[in-house]
Image: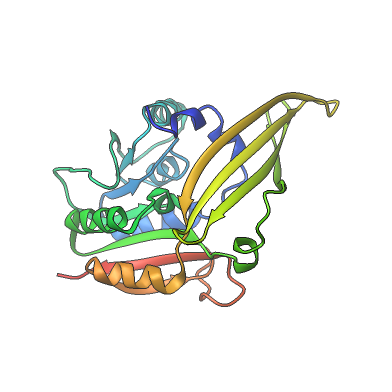
Amino acid sequence: MTSFDEWASLYDWVYAWKLDDIPFYVDEAKRSLGTVLELGCGTGRVTIPMAQAGIDVVGLDSSAKMLQVARRKARAAKPIDGDITWVRGDMREFSLNQKFHLVIIPYRGFLSILNIEQQRRCLENIRYHLLPDGRLIFDIFVPDLDTLTEHTTALVHSWDVTDPDTGRRLVVWDQSRFDNHNQIMDVRMIMEELNLSGHVVDKLYRDFQIRYIHRYEAQHLLELSGFHVLDVFGDFQRHPLNDTSTDMIWVAESIE
């Protein structure tokens, strides 16, 4: 069991709004002209649209329960023209008898690795699984210095999301603490489920940790691990990274 198992029944509802990256990853997968490896595939949020576009995908995740949800969703999705292989594994130390044209880690999955040694192990393992000139694409957020240094644990409203089938709404709050020496965020997400009358009918807490990464730290980490950075986008429309960007989308090529 992993800490991500407890997200399996909630993830697709909580993150139903997260759609902007799917066309980007589908397009990059089409360009790769081969099987794609997705690390941290979760419930198949990106995996299944890629397969629906005719792409063969290997989806790897450490959570058995997340993969159960992904398999169920894939069986219900129509049509799927590509093949999906689901694999339970750890992105830091997986071993597959296959090499890929493209490896992706969508929606900040790389940040779940909490120290440099394990990050390098993950990147070197990815490089081993890439074909010559194969590419790695992953996205992370741009650390906000004001947030990192405000020294408060006040609740912050993150977003609301409505279940289209039931009409019930989730109000999602964030309460984070920052260890800026080790660049670790202790995140508590609080989700209040409201009924149609606006009354709270359920309240759920989920705690997790991530390690934030600064721009040039990410670049040096990639270069030390045998990659050449091809692009750094500031959004999923491929605009250049600038001082107003909130996301970093890294595109790197394996160096022989």
- Farthest residue toward the top? 201
Query: Residue 19: x and y, percent?
Result: 56, 49
Position of the N terminus by quadrant: top left
Inspect this view and state whether residue 227 appears: no
Query: Residue 167: x and y, percent?
Result: 74, 29
The front one of 142 and 85 is 142
Is 216 situated left or right of 152 in this image?
A: left
Query: Residue 38: x and y, percent?
Result: 34, 47
Q: Quick check: 181 above or below 233?
A: above
Q: Residue at x 61, y 40 (%)?
A: 189
Q: Residue at x 41, y 42 (%)?
A: 52
- Coloring scheme used: rainbow
Q: Quick check: 45 above or below 135?
A: above
Position of the C terminus by quadrant: bottom left
How many callouts does the rendering have? 0
Q: Residue at x 49, y 51 (%)?
A: 22
Is 71 situated left or right of 35 in this image?
A: right
Find residue 4 and report its image quarter.
top left
Inspect this view and state whether residue 53 appears: yes
The front one of 9 and 166 is 9
Find residue 42 and report its image quarter.
top left
Query: Residue 115: x and y, percent?
Result: 35, 54
Is 18 situated left or right of 109 in this image?
A: right
